[in-house]
Each structure stands twice: as structure tokens, then as C-alpha cells.
Amino acid sequence: MARDEDKRNFALRKESGDESSVFSGGTPRQAALKAARRLDPADSESAADRTKIRLREKGTHKIHIYEGWAWEEEAPDDKPDWMPNEITKGNVEKQGVEHLEEI
């Protein structure tokens, strides 16, 4: 696991430029996976709608663009007691990187 100083912050950015949430991770993909799990989940991965996720790396002018989707499935049999029976899973595909002129 990445140490705290290895973590980077990524702001979820709308097309309008509004930044609503911040996700942290060692890589942009790790933050994108966290953002994908917040999407409305479908009943299965194949039925999930794909949504564009734009993450601006804090302190830079880079926007990492992903296509993300989420779905619900049963938790594994060896799940801890606190985990619900249905869990949300997510996945992402990198679409590219944009560079902003100004933040």
C-alpha cells in the first residue's frame, strides 16, 4: 500500500469546470476506481452504463479522463461481519489526458 506521502489528490471535474469531490490514490486509476464506485450501480457488469469520469490532479493542469461503470454483486462468502450482502464494484478504462491552460 502506498504511504501517505505517495498519495496524490484528484478532483472530480464536470465539463463546466466545477469540482465536486476529491479522491486520493497513488495513481489516477486508483482514484478513478473510487469515483466509479459512486456511480449508480446496475444489476450486472454487462448491464452497467458507462460514464465519463474526469479527474484533475491537484497541483497540476492535467485532467485524466476515464470511462467508468458500476454494478452490484453478492459479497464473497468469507466477507467480514460488517460488510453488506450486496456490494458495489466498479471498473474504468483510460481514455486520455487533457492539459488545461489555467485551473
Image (tube, rainbow, N blue to C red):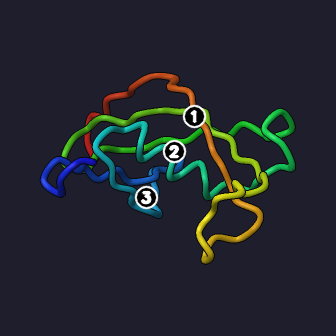
Q: Residue 83, relative to residue 73: is it above or below? A: below
Of the two numbered discs 3 and 2 in the rendering, the one whose residue sits closer to the viewer:
2
Q: Are marks 1 and 3 in contact (CB under 8 Å)?
A: no
Q: Residues within 10 Å of mark 3 (few under 14, many from 20)?
A: some
The residue that label 1 is drawn on is: 92
Q: Amino acid at mark 1?
A: Val
Relative side of 72 to 15, left or right: right
Q: Earlier in the sequence, mark 1 or mark 3?
A: 3
| Apparent side of residue 95 relative to residue 31 in the rendered image (left or right) | right
Q: Earlier in the sequence, mark 3 or mark 2?
A: 3
Identify residue for label 2: 33
Could you tell me which residue is drawn at 63 percent across and 45 percent down? 90
- Above or below, 50 against 40 in this view is above
Of residue 5 and residue 86, the one placed in the foreground of this image is 86
Residue 2 is situated, as x and y percent measured from the top left of the image, at 23, 48
Tell whether label 1 touches label 2 (CB within 8 Å).
Answer: yes
Give the distance between the C-alpha atoms of the residues marked 3 and 2, in whole angstroms.
17 Å
Contact (Cβ within 8 Å) of mark 3 with mark 2: no
